[in-house]
Image (cartoon, rainbow, N blue to C red):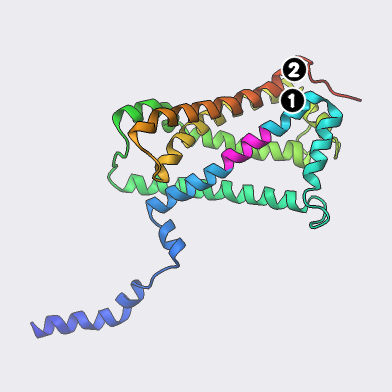
């Protein structure tokens, strides 16, 4: 008996003590499935806010070239002279990219954790049926959206994928030139349909991940998810459609 006790005491004072050394609270939380769901929910909320504001701002295209370019210049001059021109815009872009990377990392690592553990249902069978297609396709819709973001930045921010028509400072013509290409317009529409499916399930599950879920409100949660996704998708799809229909035309 005494020998057994002595064998246990030796290792406990060394490696076991080091093994029990705690990480910072946020890293410790993120190492759990709950923490990863929080990160996915919060970064997803940032993404929803961005795409909604982005879509509403782009509606200024229908007011004409001058108004749209004025709006684009307004974004470049946010908080000037507190910040130099375009600095705050790039800070916001950097924050958005960080949110996308955080969302992606949380999604990948959470999927691995779920595969290693026994699956546990956290929603009713009826709720699962509502979002089943959207939830099963999240990996693919997310991949499509990620590729679209990369291409979109190359096309309308860097200008390297704009077909040689990119003119810095002329946001209206840059968008019109880009979406006037049928292949690009088709890709834009496909990407936004994928975005809509991703948003529907994302908004649907966001409240659940944050613990804001109750059977009494699930119907409204579904309506909110579907309505928000529909508004964003229809608004975004209207741009390539109306450019191809010559409602929005390139100005010389």
- Any magenta on residue 147? no
247 lies above or below 1 = above
Q: Which residues are magenta?
A: 47-55
Residue shown at the point (32%, 48%) measured from the top left: 116
Q: Nearer the viewer, residue 166 or 74?
A: 74
Quadrant including the N terminus: bottom left
Mark yes or no: residue 190 visible: no
Q: Nearer the viewer, residue 200 or 149?
A: 200
Q: Is residue 60 left or right of residue 49?
A: right
- Please tell me in which quadrant of the rendered image residue 239 appears: top right
- How many residues crowd mark 2 within 10 Å: few (<14), some (14–19), many (20+)? some
Q: Secondary structure at mark 1?
A: helix
**Majority SS type along the magenta span:** helix
Q: Position of residue 54 (x, y in %)?
A: 68, 36
How many numbered callouts? Answer: 2
As drawn, the label of residue 244 is 2
What x and y, as percent, mark residue 171? 81, 34
Marks 2 and 1, the one that precedes in the sequence? 1
As measured in the structure, the alpha-carbon distance from the residue carrying label 2 to the one carrying label 1 is 7 Å
Q: Is residue 22 left or right of residue 54?
A: left
Q: Quadrant of the C terminus?
A: top right
Residue appearing at x 64%, y 38% in the figure: 149
Residue 179: assigned label = 1
Percent x, y of residue 73: 82, 41
Going 46% across and 46% down the picture, which residue do you hit?
108
Name above or below for residue 13 compared with residue 139: below
Cβ atoms under marks 2 and 1 closer than 8 Å = yes
């Amino acid at each position: 008996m005494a020998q057994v006790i002595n064998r246990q005491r030796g290792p406990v004072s060394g490696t076991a003590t080091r093994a029990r050394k705690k990480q910072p609270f946020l890293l410790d939380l993120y190492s759990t499935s709950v923490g990863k769901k929080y990160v996915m929910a919060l970064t997803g909320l940032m993404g929803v806010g961005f795409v909604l504001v982005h879509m509403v701002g782009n509606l200024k295209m229908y007011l004409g070239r001058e108004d749209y370019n004025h709006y684009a210049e307004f974004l470049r001059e946010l908080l000037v002279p507190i910040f130099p021109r375009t600095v705050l815009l790039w800070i916001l872009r950097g924050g958005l990219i960080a949110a996308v990377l955080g969302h992606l990392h949380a999604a990948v690592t959470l999927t691995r954790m779920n595969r290693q553990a026994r699956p546990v249902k956290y929603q009713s069978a009826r709720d699962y049926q509502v979002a089943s297609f959207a939830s099963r396709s999240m990996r693919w819709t997310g991949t499509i959206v990620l590729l679209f973001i990369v291409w979109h930045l190359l096309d309308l921010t860097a200008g390297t994928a704009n077909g040689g028509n990119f003119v810095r400072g002329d946001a209206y013509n840059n968008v019109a030139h880009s979406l006037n290409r049928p292949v690009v317009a088709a890709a834009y529409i496909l990407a936004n349909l994928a975005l809509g499916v991703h948003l529907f399930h994302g908004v649907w599950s966001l409240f659940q991940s944050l613990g804001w879920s109750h059977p009494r409100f699930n119907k409204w949660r579904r309506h909110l998810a579907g309505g928000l996704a529909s508004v964003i998708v229809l608004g975004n799809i209207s741009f390539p459609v109306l450019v191809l229909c010559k409602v929005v035309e390139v100005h010389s």
